[in-house]
Image: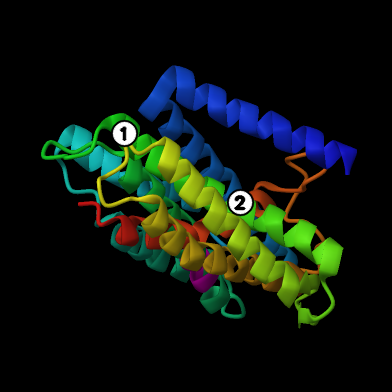
Amino acid sequence: MVQRILSTVTLWLVVGGSLWFFRTNGALVLIALISLFTLREFYQLMRAIGYTPFDKLGLFFGTLITLAPWVEAQFHRPAHPLLALATVVFAVRLLGERTPENRVESLCSTIFGLVYISLLMQYLTRIITPLPADTISANGRLLLCLWVVVVAKFCDMGALLTGLAIGKHKMSPLISPKKTWEGAVGGVIFSMITGATIAHFARDVFPAHMTPVVAALIAAPIAVLGIVADLVESVIKRRANAKDSGATIPGIGGMFDLSDSILLAAPVGYFLFGLP
């Protein structure tokens, strides 16, 4: 537990320092690294299951897909066909580099990783990428991105503390035995309070409609989906017979263990913010 706390504090210091000193560019680097390491661990889990994804080229395409909105804004070149292009490349490679017994699994696991991780993480990039006709500042976008991450991750914290205190009814004993319904409710409430608090102090840079009440309401579905995403990762790890997705972060596990709740939260946050 001590190691977990130390790692958590260190990670938040790194994130805070990167955003404070490097702003949008720092956030882009962090998002790209989180996406890259999460996808890498996902492919490792697929190999543990017995599949053979095209991991090296998948990581290359995955990073490009995650950063696509920024590439479009900077170079005025459409980057949305990247997922389709990756699918074409892997379909061609499939015929000559995999055996009949694992061709379907190789293609499916590779593409699913790009969709579930790289494409969903792309929405964090969409949130922070400034656009010419913006009515919100670059710092406002940066804080909205941080808001999504904090709301999703603080649900984990609230659920853990509430579950330890009063948790009795198991939510999904076959997938994640430690999760309780009481913990889930506590996590959602914790996220709503956190989201409203941040919106109050960031009201000068947030969009005008992002009042504390609206922020609390938006935080609720994001928190719920964070719990769902955590369960999805648990399903994948159980299929791979793995306790953690990796050992990248001492006391926590892998990057996938850290980023899981953000994956479903990012696109929902983007849509609910009403950003272009």
What is the magenta range? 107-112
Residue count near mark 2 (Cα–Cα under 10 Å), binned few <14, some 14–19, many ≥20: many
Q: Quadrant of the N terminus?
A: top right
- Outermost residue toward the left in this view: 133
Q: Is residue 27 above or below residue 232?
A: above
Residue 50 visible in the snapshot: no
Q: By what rule are the colours in the image chosen?
A: rainbow
Residue 227 position, x and y percent, is 62, 67
The residue nearer to you, when weighing 103 against 114, is 114
Residue 228 position, x and y percent, is 59, 71
Task: Please tell me which residue is depicted at 69% across the width and 61% down the height of the picture.
Answer: 45
Amino acid type indicated by mark 2: Lys
Q: CA distance from mark 2 to mark 1?
A: 24 Å
Amino acid type indicated by mark 1: Asp
Q: Which residue is mark 2?
A: 153
Q: Which residue is mark 1?
A: 204
Residue 258 visible in the snapshot: yes
Task: Please tell me which residue is depicted at 69% across the width and 56% down the height of the picture.
Answer: 158
Left or right? Give the position of 27 relative to 243: left
Task: Please tell me which residue is depicted at 82% across the width and 71% down the height of the picture.
Answer: 167
The circle on residue 169 is none
